[in-house]
């Protein structure tokens, strides 16, 4: 355990705690937004990929069944091809995986910030606490460089999820209830 803080150390420890809370909140929102982007890209992938596959199968079957079905088969093949081109161009499955990985990375940062604040900070020296904060900040900044910027819809849905308790643990609710 560390020695009791003097006024200057207590103020600095408090400032580190506040910054850890900011980092935790930032990571929480960023992670939730990335998970919303994951859902959006999964939907795009399904809404374009499924029709492309079905239309390609139907057009192939129509072309094989009779020569009279060549024109409708050709039209269906062109539509299927168009869906496939769009899907390939926007690379929805890659973006979905990238957003999911970014969301998971932000959740790791959020958890580490919370643990640093609640578990380590009271027992760490100011230098150790400052080092932990710097490392977490660097991790968050690095993740920010690689994560896809969220769109307005992802932002609003993430905010709604968080505001309605989507990031609340049962243990936090129990702790709050017993503290009253």
Image: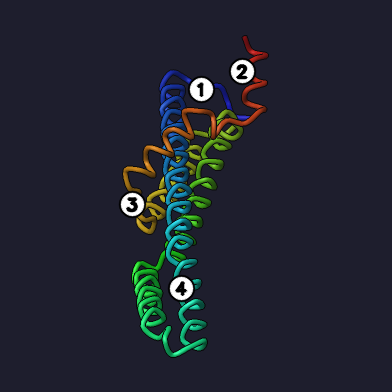
Binning the other alpha carbons within 10 Å of mark 2 as few (below 14), some (14 to 19) or many (20 upward) gives few
Of the numbered discs 1 and 2, the one sitting upstream in the chain is: 1
Q: What color scheme is it?
A: rainbow
4 or 2: mark nearer the eye: 4
3 or 4: mark nearer the eye: 4
Distance from Cα at disc 3 to Cα at disc 1: 41 Å
Establish if 137 lies above or below 74: above
Left or right, 117 with reference to 76: right
Of the numbered discs 3 and 2, the one sitting upstream in the chain is: 3
Q: Please, which residue is most extreme toward the front here? A: 68
Provide the residue designation for mark 1: 5
Foreground residue, 67 or 13? 67
Provide the residue designation for mark 2: 176
Foreground residue, 139 or 74? 74
Where is residue 116? Give x, y as percent.
55, 37
Marks 3 and 4 close (CB-CB < 8 Å): no
Of the numbered discs 1 and 4, the one sitting upstream in the chain is: 1
Of the numbered discs 4 and 2, the one sitting upstream in the chain is: 4
Establish if 87 lies above or below 166: below
Provide the residue designation for mark 3: 149
Q: Residue at x 49, y 83 (%)?
A: 60
Where is residue 145? Give x, y as percent.
35, 56
Binning the other alpha carbons within 10 Å of mark 4 as few (below 14), some (14 to 19) or many (20 upward) gives many
């Amino acid at each position: 355990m560390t020695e009791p803080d003097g006024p200057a150390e207590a103020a600095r420890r408090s400032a580190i705690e506040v910054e850890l809370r900011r980092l935790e909140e930032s990571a929480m929102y960023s992670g939730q937004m990335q998970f919303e982007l994951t859902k959006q890209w999964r939907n795009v992938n399904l809404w374009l990929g499924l029709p492309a596959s079905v239309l390609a199968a139907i057009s192939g079957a129509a072309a094989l069944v009779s020569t009279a079905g060549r024109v409708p088969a050709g039209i269906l093949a062109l539509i299927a091809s168009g869906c496939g081109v769009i899907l390939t161009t926007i690379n929805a499955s890659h973006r979905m995986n990238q957003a999911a990985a970014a969301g998971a990375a932000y959740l790791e940062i959020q958890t580490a910030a919370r643990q640093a604040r609640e578990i380590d900070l009271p027992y760490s020296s100011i230098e150790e606490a400052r080092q932990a904060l710097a490392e977490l900040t660097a991790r968050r900044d690095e993740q920010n460089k690689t994560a896809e910027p969220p769109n307005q819809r992802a932002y609003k849905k993430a905010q709604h999820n968080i505001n309605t308790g989507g990031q609340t643990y049962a243990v936090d609710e129990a702790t709050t209830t017993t503290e009253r």
